[in-house]
Image: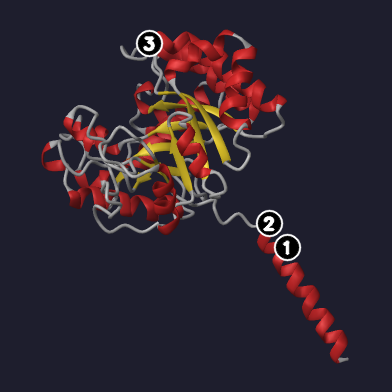
Amino acid sequence: MAGAEQQFKAAMFVIGLLLLATLDYTGAQTGVCYGRLGSNLPSPADVVALCNQNNIKRMRIYDPDQSTLQALGGSNIEVILGVPNTDLQNVAASQDNANTWVQNNVRNYPNVKFRYIAVGNEVSPIKGDTAQYANFLLPAIQNIFNAISAAGLGIKVSTAVETELVGNNFPPSGGTFKPEVQNFINPIVQFLASKGAPLLVNVYPYFAYIFNSQSIALEYALFTSSGITTPDGVKYQNLLDALLDATYSALERAGGQSVEIVVSETGWPSDGGGQATSIDNARTYNTNLIGHVNGNSGTPKRPGRAIETYIFDLFDEDQKSPDYEKHFGLFLPNRQPKYPISF
């Protein structure tokens, strides 16, 4: 009997291990954006070590920097890899160009855990510094998707947009893409829907607040409000959820009912923008953000699910402007946290 009991316990142990292996414990993990436009930043190897020390399991990078990709190899950090806007015309021009891009920057790094390819960042036909790239975005997405598929890599391909594309965001149920961007964004949304890919969205309650502080309470932006009830009777506890649901409404109207949103950037600056920018507000926003998106509350429109989110930014980037753009960092260049925060 003792032998049979030991065999039973061993079998149950193996079954337990198999069950553990199938559970996705990273589903609710909050990631970070790793921008490199700062002075005296640590080496990529030190950055990867910093992420491991702080239980940061996901990272967004904005271009295929070779030293960063080498450092990420074997780290088990899941990566959003950006195709920079400056590469879009070349990648859109031919399938061969896209195949070469994927070979050089994805297939050559088999030990990197690529989660998404973000083709372009905040491209918009009505935004002065990115309008020149708008016509190249969809063919670039399609060509990168084809290259990834042909390589059998199974990586989701998308693009990162800003919520400024949504013209009517209150109440959130009325969200719709601005008429002047619909010919641009609707085919992209429909392509993502056809491939089961999410839309990456850069969502900043900070900007929504500072541009409309007469109507939006700071507490509502910082997750510390008791919430508001919208004209259509839906209660929102925070501005992030409202912005997300306005974008979900816009996606539905554009033929993207099945498209999920990944929050590819969000954060709060600690300085450089008046009273709203302080270390205390940055800490409050990012701490409450992590607690909110890692829970299973979701948003009123999409309840009961974790919201995959990437905090901007790992470090301050003092080479950016205007001034508040320099102060989104979670960590100082010496790798000490700017304020206490737990992932």
- Assign the N terminus to one quadrant of the image: bottom right
Q: Amino acid at mark 3?
A: Ala
- Please name the residue that numbered disc 2 is placed on: 22
Q: Quadrant of the C terminus?
A: bottom left
Give the residue at the far left of this rendering: 275
Up-down relation of residue 229 to residue 250 (above or below): below
User: Visible in this render: residue 225?
Assistant: no
Q: Does any portion of residue 190 appear in the rendered image?
A: yes
Calculate the distance from the C-alpha at mark 1 to the C-alpha at mark 3.
50 Å
Q: Which residue is mark 1?
A: 18
Residue 131's label in the rendered image is: 3
User: How dense is the environment of label 2, judged by Cα within 10 Å: few (below 14), some, or many (20 and up)?
Assistant: few
Task: Specify the quadrant of the image occupied by residue 243.
Answer: top left
Eyeballing the image, is 144 above or below 34?
above
Mark 1 falls on what kind of element? Answer: helix
Marks 2 and 1 in Cβ contact (< 8 Å):
yes
Mark 3 vs mark 2: which is more N-terminal? 2
Front-most of residues 195 and 108:
108
Q: Is residue 189 above or below residue 281?
A: above
Which residue is painted at 41% across and 18% down in the image?
123
Residue 314 position, x and y percent, is 34, 44
Q: Residue at x 33, y 48 (%)?
A: 237
Q: Disc 2 residue type? A: Thr
Labelled pair 1, 3 in contact (Cβ < 8 Å): no
* Disc 2 element: helix
Q: Residue at x 50, y 52 (%)?
A: 28
